[in-house]
Amino acid sequence: MTRTVDAVVVGGGPSGATAAHELARRGRSVLLLDRAGRIKPCGGAIPPRLIQDFGIPDRLLCARITSARMVSPSSRGVDMPVGDGFVGMVNRDVFDEWLRERAAGCGAERIAGRFLSVGRDPDGTAVVSFQRNGVAKSEAPEQVRARVVIGADGAISAVAEQCIPGADRIRHVFAYHEIIRAPAEGFDGQRCDVYYQGKLSPDFYGWVFPHGDTASVGSGSARKGFSLRKSVGDLRAAAGLTDAETIRREGAPIPMKPLRRWDNGRDVVLAGDAAGVVAPASGEGIYYAMEGGRLAGDAADLFLTTGDAKALRTARRRFMRAHGTVFRILGIMQWFWYSSDKRRERFVSICADPDVQRLTWDSYMNKKLTRKDPMAHVRIFLKDVAHLLGLVSA
């Protein structure tokens, strides 16, 4: 007979691994299904809030960032020092595996394999079909019954497409990066460089993020036909990194807007990229993925306890209550400031303002809009309007 578990989590990235950990530590039987060997293209930045909330050990940090440099279309650089504290950097292959192992340490069963489908037993229970890595495709897939299924299988989520109406209409930016060997000289391993130049991305940005001995050099765009490989080659040339050794190349879609619905009203809930929780404008995803995974785990646990499918709605409701305003503001910023090089030039100019820098870092590091010092917000608003009207030079 097909065995039954409390939860099957599809996808072992930060979101899925966190959801599996949350359920397993509460004594739920969890199967964590993950494709082995996949590394998502990612800058790898994690804020102090994530490190604190999710108990990330220092040994996983490959670099500590103390400043960011914004580079305008005219190649003007504006430095934004972090101030007190730092932004941690992680290598996703090491970081994600640690998260999966932490879930396993609490009792989650790990299986390396490919998700195939969610079906139904005669009694209506979800049946997850999958195929283990190394097993011939001609062999019959394995099946497991699940009281709840968490889809954390990335931006183009098979779980979402099969189970959640409207999931196929999610908007994406396509990201590509190259992991290079960091130069021994002339390379600042404590500074992230962000390039706001239309030639490198017509609607997003390019980046150079240090990772200790290596660095991530990448770009993203939603525009069809735009060559991200050429963009990254141009970015490496601009940053003096053309001759640096290339270790590997990776690309993947990244969602830019949360789905309107994360559950099927029955026994499936989404988390992470599958739910669309990557911040617009910044593209930040690790914190929001883990927060979404935690909330999906909470919702699934409540559903398993009560049997009320409405419990699954709480994952999205709680996430949007905490972060929805930030996502809306960032979406407007990306739509407006990234639309032309003229606006990008002014955007970088605004980043030189001390009030902007202080409030930006405070909001990023703590993952909430800063409400203290209301006069600083007034000053930023007035300066923003002046830039919009062209009353100040870029």
Image (cartoon, grey):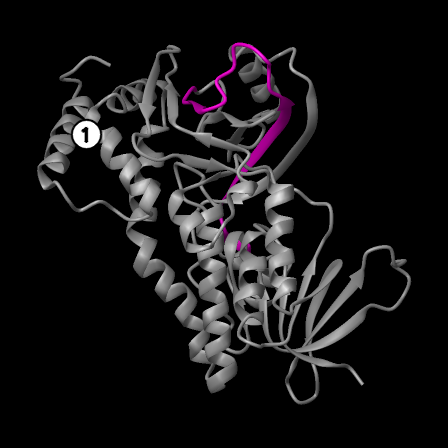
Residue 260 at what x, y percent from top left?
42, 60
Seen at 76% across and 58% down, the residue is: 113
Whether 178 is among the magenta residues is: yes
Residue 65 at what x, y percent from top left?
43, 29
Three-letter amino acid code at the position of disc 1: Asp
SS under mark 1? helix
Front-most of residues 168 and 310: 310
Seen at 45% across and 46% down, the residue is: 278
Q: Is residue 20 left or right of residue 131?
A: left
Relative to 132, say whether 194 is above or below: above
Residue 366 at what x, y percent from top left?
32, 46
Whether 356 is among the magenta residues is: no
Q: Where is mark 1, residue-wise?
A: 355
Quarter of the picture containing the N terminus is bottom right
Q: Is residue 70 left or right of residue 23?
A: left
Quarter of the picture containing the C terminus is top left
Q: Is residue 184 left or right of residue 120?
A: left
Q: Is residue 276 visible?
A: no
Picture quadrant of residue 108: bottom right
Disc 1 residue crowd, few under 14, some 14–19, many 20+, Cα 10 Å = some
Q: Is residue 143 visible?
A: yes
What's the magenta region? 168-197
Seen at 68% across and 30% down, the residue is: 249
Relative to 276, say whether 188 is above or below: above
Residue 185 at what x, y percent from top left?
56, 10
Q: Is residue 239 left or right of residue 77?
A: right
